């Protein structure tokens, strides 16, 4: 069994690590686009072209499924990806976890890239799953790029700027970019008012990983022998994990997987 994941950068680490935990025997293909990122502030046409290039590079490895581990690509390129790859390769998009976040009644903040914030796609999810719940859309310019390069100061600045736009009474924050899940602890600390109950954070990686396995009829087997391999593609070229990936627990988990032959 082989699962491919694509993203602009290392945001795919979170979903890849989730697949690894659910099926340690699954081979993984990680296809990202460091030469073309960030996708967040780009046009729809740009995102579609670069997402298709990353997906084609992954598809050349003949995976059983492709996870689009990127909210921006899911918003702007998912129909194009499915039109080209399905039904041969099931394509699983990443949807911001607005529905479970809104289930508690809110208020809810959605942190996302500028391209996703305010998009018809995200507004549609809010309308469908958070009707009547106070929702604040929070653009986070620069945060994905800072996470991509493990830029500690840049992460602190971007998180602080987004936290300043987040109402102090929010009870849930949706992490609407996969990169943000790598720094979830820092985001929680920034939005947690003193003396109030913990703010809940909602990412998508675990649900997306489980959905990919369901699509190909593979049940989670966390106790399976960890005999998998890992292939890394950076803008289409075979490579190792980027050094910045090792700054995060998910990257270190995947670094222990044997390179694909």
Image (cartoon, helix red, strand yellow):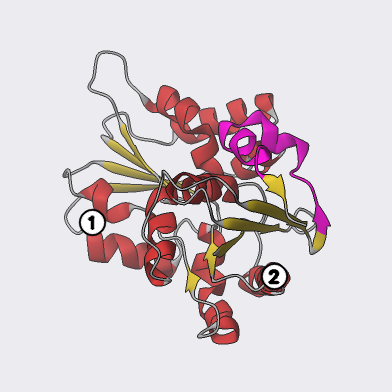
**Mark 1, residue position:** 130
Residue drawn at (66%, 25%), measured in percent from left and top?
A: 152
In the image, 80: left or right of 207?
right
Q: Is residue 152 above or below residue 5?
A: above
Q: Nearer the viewer, residue 138 or 10?
A: 10
Q: Work out whether residue 7 can be spotted.
A: no
Whether residue 119 is in magenta: the answer is no
In the image, 113: left or right of 193?
right
Which labelled disc corresponds to residue 21? none
Q: Whole-percent x and y of residue 224?
A: 45, 48
Q: How many marks?
A: 2
Q: Whole-percent x and y of residue 104?
A: 17, 43
Q: Quadrant of the C terminus?
A: bottom right
Helix, strand or loop under label 2 = loop
Q: Main secondary structure of the magenta part?
A: helix
* CA gap, disc 2 and disc 1: 39 Å
Q: Is residue 237 above or below residue 97?
A: below
| Callout in the foreground (2, 1) | 2
**Mark 2, residue position:** 61
Residue drawn at (49%, 36%), measured in percent from left and top?
A: 162
Please state the extent of the stretch shown in magenta in the rendering.
Answer: 238-257
Q: Nearer the viewer, residue 133 or 199?
A: 199
Q: Is residue 195 above or below residue 144?
A: above
């Amino acid at each position: 069994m082989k699962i491919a994941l694509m993203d602009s950068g290392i945001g795919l680490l979170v979903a890849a690590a989730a697949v690894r935990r659910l099926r340690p025997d699954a081979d993984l293909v990680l296809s990202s686009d460091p030469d073309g990122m960030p996708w967040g502030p780009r046009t729809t046409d740009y995102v579609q072209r670069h997402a298709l290039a990353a997906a084609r590079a992954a598809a050349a490895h003949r995976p059983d499924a492709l996870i689009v581990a990127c909210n921006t690509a899911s918003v702007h390129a998912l129909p194009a990806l499915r039109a080209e790859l399905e039904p041969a390769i099931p394509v699983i998009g990443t949807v911001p976890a607005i529905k479970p976040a809104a289930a508690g009644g809110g208020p809810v903040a959605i942190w996302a890239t500028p391209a996703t914030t305010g998009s018809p796609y995200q507004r549609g999810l809010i309308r469908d799953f958070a009707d009547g719940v106070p929702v604040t859309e929070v653009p986070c310019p620069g945060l994905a790029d800072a996470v991509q390069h493990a830029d500690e100061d840049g992460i602190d600045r971007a998180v602080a700027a987004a936290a300043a736009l987040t109402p102090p009474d929010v009870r849930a924050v949706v992490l609407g970019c996969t990169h943000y899940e790598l720094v979830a602890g820092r985001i929680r600390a920034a939005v947690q008012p003193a003396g109030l109950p913990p703010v809940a954070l909602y990412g998508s990686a675990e649900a997306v990983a489980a959905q990919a396995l369901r699509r190909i009829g593979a049940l989670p087997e966390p106790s399976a022998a960890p005999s998998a391999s890992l292939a890394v593609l950076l803008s289409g070229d075979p490579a190792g994990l980027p050094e910045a990936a090792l700054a995060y627990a998910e990257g270190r988990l995947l670094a222990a997987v044997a390179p694909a032959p």
